[in-house]
Image (cartoon, grey):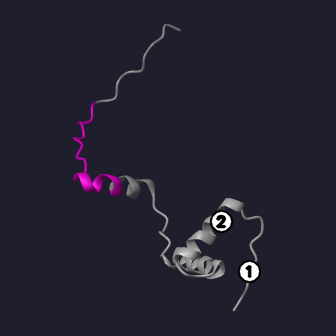
Amino acid sequence: MASMTIRNIDDRLKARLRLRAAAHGRSMEDEARYILRAALSAEAPGPRNLAEVIRARLAPTGGVVLDIPPREPIRDPVDFGR
C-alpha cells in the first residue's frame, strides 16, 4: 500500500475531520481514507456539449417546442446615401 502526506491543511478543516472521525468511531486517518474512497468511487461524468446540458435542463418540464418561421426572400441592402 502507498502512503501519502498532506501538508498545509487549514486548522478548521483538520478540526472538522477530527470531529467527523470521532462521530464515526474512526481515526482521522481512517476517516480521510473513507472520504477519499467515497469521493473517488463515483463514476466521473463524461464531457457533455452545450446542447446536451440544455436538453437535460429542460427535460423535466417537457421540453420546449419552437415554431420555425418560414424563410423570406433576401432583402436588398440598405443604402446609407454614400
Q: Which residues are magenta?
A: 56-72
- Whole-angstrom CA distance, mark 1 to mark 2, is 19 Å
Q: Is residue 42 left or right of residue 15?
A: left
Where is the N terminus found, in terms of image quarters? bottom right
Prevalent SS, magenta region: loop
> Are there few (<14), some (14-19), or many (20+) residues within 10 Å of tag 1?
few
Does 61 lie within the magenta span? yes
Tell me the amino acid under the disc marked 1.
Answer: Met
Frontmost of labels 1 and 2 is 2
Image spot of residue 39 (x, y percent): 53, 73
Q: Which mark is drawn over residue 15? A: 2
Image spot of residue 60 (x, y percent): 26, 56
- Look at 42% across and 16% down and name the residue there: 78
Q: Is residue 72 above or below residue 79?
A: below
Judging by the rendered image, the residue that carries numbered circle 1 is: 4
Q: Is residue 40 above or below residue 56?
A: below
Residues 31 and 62: in front is 31
Does 34 lie within the magenta span? no
Residues 19 and 44: in front is 19
Residues 17 and 41: in front is 17
